[in-house]
Image (cartoon, rainbow, N blue to C red):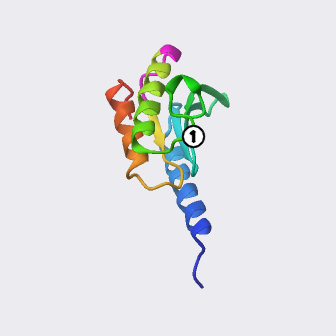
Amino acid sequence: MANSKRDLFLKRRLRVRNKLRKMAAGRARLSVHRSSKNISVQLIDDVNGVTLASASTLEKDFGVVGKNNVEAATKIGAAIAERAKKAGVEACYFDRGGFLFHGKIKALADAAREGGLKF
């Protein structure tokens, strides 16, 4: 029986999360969510269950409200790297969720790496 697109997405998301949990060792997790209109990212401390930093295209400071393209993803990646430094986080794990590491997700990750975040 064929799986729906949503079922495949959820299976991929759980597979990625479970692999990250095995090798997390107390590091923060950089979690990405991409909708049809926006992209957001959070730096999460799973041990304490708190969000250390976040960035989204919904914030008016970036000038990309309601945009979900590679340019917006690059700005969000640079912003999360800067906010992670302020929060005192140097290294983390990249949780792409069920999204493929391609296009906007890759642009966000590359911009975060250029900003000094290690994953």
Q: Residue reaching furthest right?
A: 49
Crowd band around label 1 with a 10 angstrom C-alpha radius: few (<14), some (14–19), many (20+): some
* Rendered view: 4 above or below 37: below
Image position, residue 69 (x, y; %): 44, 45
Report the side of 28 relative to 74 (left or right): right
Residue on which the image places disc 1: 66
Report the side of 37 relative to 106 (left or right): right
Indicate the amino acid at tag 1: Gly
Q: Which residues are magenta?
A: 86-91
- Quadrant for the C terminus, please: top left
Nearest to the observer: residue 92 or residue 96: 96
Image position, residue 86 (x, y; %): 49, 14
Assign a secondary structure to mark 1: loop
Image position, residue 28 (x, y; %): 52, 31
Image position, residue 9 (x, y; %): 56, 62
Nearest to the observer: residue 27 or residue 34: 34
Residue shown at the point (53%, 50%) measured from the top left: 97
Q: Residue reaching furthest left?
A: 114
28 in the magenta segment: no
* Rendered view: 15 above or below 61: below
